[in-house]
Image (cartoon, rainbow, N blue to C red):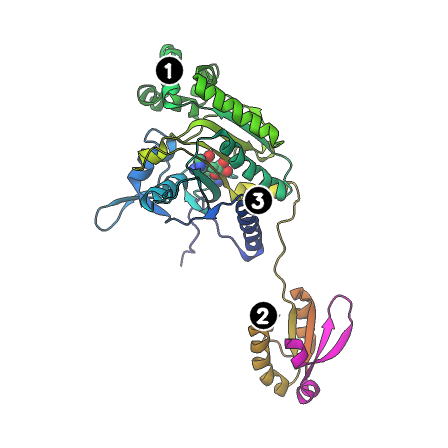
Amino acid sequence: MAKFQVPRGTFDILPKDSYKWEYIQNTFRKVAKRYQYQEIVTPIFETADLFERSVGDTSDIVQKEMYKFEDKKGRVFALRPEGTASVVRSYVENNLGVNGGITKLFYIGPMFRYDRPQAGRYRQFYQYGVEAIGSNHPYIDAEVIALQYSFLKELGLKGFVLEVNSVGCPTCSQAYSQALKDYFKPYLGELCPDCVVRFEKNPKRILDCKVPHCKAISKNAPTQLDYLDEDCKAHFEQVKTYLSDMEIPFTVNPHIVRGLDYYTRTAFEFINNNLGAQNAIGGGGRYDKLVEQVGGKDTPGIGFAAGIERLILSLENENLPMGEEPKPLYYWIAIGETARKHSVSIIAKLRQSGNSVDFDIEKESVKSQMKAADKSGAQFALIFGEDEFKKNTVIRKNLVTGDQEELSLQELKG
Ligand code: HAM
């Protein structure tokens, strides 16, 4: 029979790696809580029009990369390609902003994009991210960036840079769209068919095109920074000042084009240049119109998300630790039939009282059990034979030093 394989662009997280994932997720949870963000978990599928309306129906993510399907009743859903739209949907639906102030949320989970798989790019990938909804103050922009920055620092990562930009508000981005149209008009005959459509619908998306000739044409296109109105300019200046106050190094990259349509004002990316083509290890920005677009009140927001796979690649490149493979405290060695028989209830009680105990019922000889104990990485072997059974004791052998002592079973459990 033909063997089954994981779908292209997806992967299993095997036991030899799963502890790394646990470590990264737990470290992120810890850092997010330091900034007073609370975890939110949303479904991995939503109605497709949520993403079409928010991420944008001219974006590649919606047009080309969305896993869209009909359920048995003909309703159209999509596997989430990103987390922000779902979080904002939940914020509106559950009235999370009812008490005023800023609602600070974080999430961790799989996202799905039908893209061409390559190193660092998958069809199912894991993101961690945050969303801060309810304030347009530039301090919040810097705080959201600071959270990702301090998380990467906490992991010990060095080889990354932060690039920031402002993509303006709807008013100034209208002037910019016109400037782009004026710029691209003479090249209309040379642009790819997708970009010809983008030219009419949303010329900014041309800047995100991956076709080499379109990329070359875009190189000298005007940037949004030259078209910011006074308020957006002042906002961007303040974000930069707060970042400097927080001692977070950054460069301004006016060419940052995010692949999603909901951005206003601040947009940023964390780049690891050692990763090759897929070098973005996180990105985000402000979305001051998104809550309203999704059916809520006019409420500003900002957030970021980052891919765990690319983060693991980055940490591996720098030989950084990612937690430790879990090892048992005890390896139980039972010698002889009677001892084996009584081992079952003793091991159960030891585990019940919180100890991690490894035991292999299939191994009978002392030699094979000792070998397995060494291999398991346990701190101690617990040796239990006929004599120990009679005395209600066990021999505890330190597998590193070789020291051993006899303890009562009572002492061991305590
Ligand atoms: P994004 O830039 O599309 O933004 O994705 C964020 C991060 O997810 C990327 O920087 C990258 O690390 C990772 N990523 C994206 N696609 C893939 C893929 N195919 N394979 C592996 N990793 C990938 C967003 O998703 C926005 N929701 C971020 C945001 C939150 N903006 C505001 N709030």
Which residue appears at 24% of the width and 45% of the height?
Answer: 75
Q: Hey, what amino acid is under mark 1? A: Ala
Q: Hey, what amino acid is under mark 3? A: Ile
Residue 175: mark in rendering? 1
Q: Secondary structure at mark 3?
A: helix
Residue 412 falls within the magenta-colored stretch: yes
Which residue appears at 60% of the width and 75% of the height?
Answer: 350
Q: Earlier in the sequence, mark 2 or mark 1?
A: 1
- Give residue 290's quadrant in the image: top left
The correct choice, above or below, for 189 with respect to 379 in the image is above
* One can see residue 362 in this view: no
- The 10 Å Cα crowd at callout 2, few under 14, some 14 to 19, many 20 or more, is few
Q: Nearer the viewer, residue 74 or 210?
A: 74
Q: Which residues are magenta?
A: 385-414
Picture coordinates of residue 337, whole percent (x, y): 62, 86
Circle 2 is placed at which residue position? Answer: 354
**Between tags 2 and 3, which lies in front?**
2
The correct choice, above or below, for 234 with respect to 135 in the image is above
Which residue appears at 58% of the width and 73% of the height?
Answer: 353
Q: Earlier in the sequence, mark 2 or mark 3?
A: 3
The correct choice, above or below, for 307 with respect to 214 in the image is below
Q: Nearer the viewer, residue 320 or 29?
A: 29
Q: Earlier in the sequence, mark 1 or mark 3?
A: 1
Q: CA distance from mark 1 to mark 3?
A: 41 Å
For the N terminus, the quadrant is bottom left
Picture coordinates of residue 375, whole percent (x, y): 67, 65
**Between tags 1 and 3, which lies in front?**
1
Circle 3 is placed at which residue position? Answer: 312
Q: Secondary structure at mark 1?
A: helix
